[in-house]
């Protein structure tokens, strides 16, 4: 029988750290993280209590440490130190200046508790890791968008947003209750309840012309962000099939999911891809033209016609 003592010790220490990191921790949350049963978590909590850690629990709520109880910082492993590098570089390039500066300050505190050998390890790697972005993620008029959104969500205060859609000539001003922030397809977005439209809307950060926090409380108790993102939309779709050269097909693996990709199969040395597409009038044909000299549209006929129309417009502009 394997000795579970070292593994259990590591888990108990990790549970203590997690208790220090949050106000309330649920037993099921711990069980999911460590992939053990609830009975095992209950036993580990009793072990911590027996060792003098002041933990109180409330049925149906979770566990918490008594106010004022704290242990000195736990030393980081070398692998954890390495993860700081990627996190710092990502924060520098993929968040707004305000959050980036806050994270830089936090990193100084983290580095201050490292052993000398780990500080050398960090210095040797950090100058050799570079993150690059192709497009600006935030508008110059609202450089601290993410920081303000985080504050709004945490404090449950409305924001005033000046937002310019792709089609509009002028931005609109609206009161928003932000629900959550997410990153998708190389852009930052946030979802919130718009008092102007009386419904939930999604906003892209690089189109925000201005953002300001208010003293107005949220008027709605919003569900978790995933609840809204995972809703099945009832937008009509059209079946699309294209035949594409093998050497090009592999370069489409990332973007194809945004056009309703369903499946693919090999046909006579080429790749036949099937999509259930929401937009065959604009989105899909424009994407297809990026690699159209290596591909053929099999169906529908309307997509072929629309693609030819776009080609004709471009041809006339070039003449």
Image (spheres, rainbow, N blue to C red):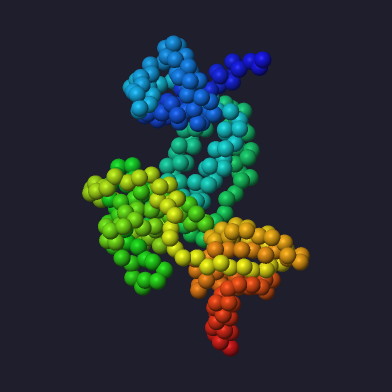
Q: Residue furthest left?
A: 216
Measured along the vertical axis of the image, is residue 76 above or below residue 137? above
Q: Position of residue 2 (x, y in %)?
A: 66, 17
Taking the spot 52% from the left edge, 57% from the top edge, the residue there is 185
Residue nearest the observer in this picture, 28 or 8: 28
Image quadrant containing the C terminus: bottom right
Q: How many numbered marks, from 0 up? A: 0
Q: Residue furthest right?
A: 269
Relative side of 55 to 183, left or right: left
Q: Residue furthest bottom?
A: 319
Taking the spot 66% from the left edge, 60% from the top edge, the residue there is 264
Taking the spot 48% from the left edge, 18% from the top edge, the residue there is 44
Does residue 36 appear in this view? yes
Does residue 255 appear in this view? no
Residue nearest the observer in this picture, 106 or 80: 80
Q: Position of residue 306 (x, y in %)?
A: 54, 78
Image quadrant containing the N terminus: top right
Measured along the vertical axis of the image, is residue 19 above or below residue 259? above
Q: Position of residue 271 (x, y in %)?
A: 70, 64
Q: Quadrant of residue 156?
A: top left
Q: Quadrant of residue 49?
A: top left
Taking the spot 38% from the left edge, 16% from the top edge, the residue there is 54
Residue nearest the observer in this picture, 126 or 246: 246
Q: Position of residue 9 (x, y in %)?
A: 55, 18
């Amino acid at each position: 029988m394997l000795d579970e003592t070292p593994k259990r010790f590591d888990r108990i220490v990790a549970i203590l750290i997690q208790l220090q990191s949050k106000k309330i921790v649920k037993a099921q949350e711990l069980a999911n993280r460590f992939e053990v049963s609830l009975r095992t978590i209950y036993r580990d909590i009793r072990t911590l209590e027996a060792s003098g850690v002041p933990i109180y629990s409330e049925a149906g709520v979770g566990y918490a440490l008594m106010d004022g109880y704290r242990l000195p910082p736990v030393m980081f492993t070398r692998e954890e130190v390495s993860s700081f590098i990627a996190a710092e570089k990502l924060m520098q390039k993929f968040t707004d200046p305000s959050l980036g500066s806050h994270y830089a300050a936090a990193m100084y505190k983290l580095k201050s508790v490292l052993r000398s050998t780990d500080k050398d390890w960090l210095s040797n790697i950090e100058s050799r890791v570079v993150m690059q972005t192709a497009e600006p993620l935030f508008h110059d008029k609202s450089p601290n968008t993410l920081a303000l959104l985080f504050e709004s969500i945490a404090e449950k205060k409305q924001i005033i947003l000046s937002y310019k859609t792709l089609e509009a000539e002028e931005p609109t001003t609206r009161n928003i209750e932000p629900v959550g922030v997410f990153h998708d397809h190389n852009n930052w977005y946030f979802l919130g309840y718009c008092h102007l439209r009386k419904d939930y809307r999604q906003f892209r950060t690089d189109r925000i012309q201005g953002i300001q926090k208010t003293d107005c409380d949220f008027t709605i108790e919003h569900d978790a962000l995933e609840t809204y993102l995972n809703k099945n939309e009832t937008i009509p779709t059209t079946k699309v099939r294209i035949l594409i050269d093998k050497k090009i097909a592999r370069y489409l693996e990332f973007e194809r999911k945004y056009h309703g990709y369903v499946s693919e199969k090999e046909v006579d040395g080429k790749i036949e891809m099937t999509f259930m597409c929401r937009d065959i009038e604009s989105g899909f044909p424009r994407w297809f033209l990026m690699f159209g000299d290596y591909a053929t549209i099999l169906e529908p006929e309307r997509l072929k016609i629309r693609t030819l129309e776009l080609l004709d417009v471009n041809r006339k502009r070039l003449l």
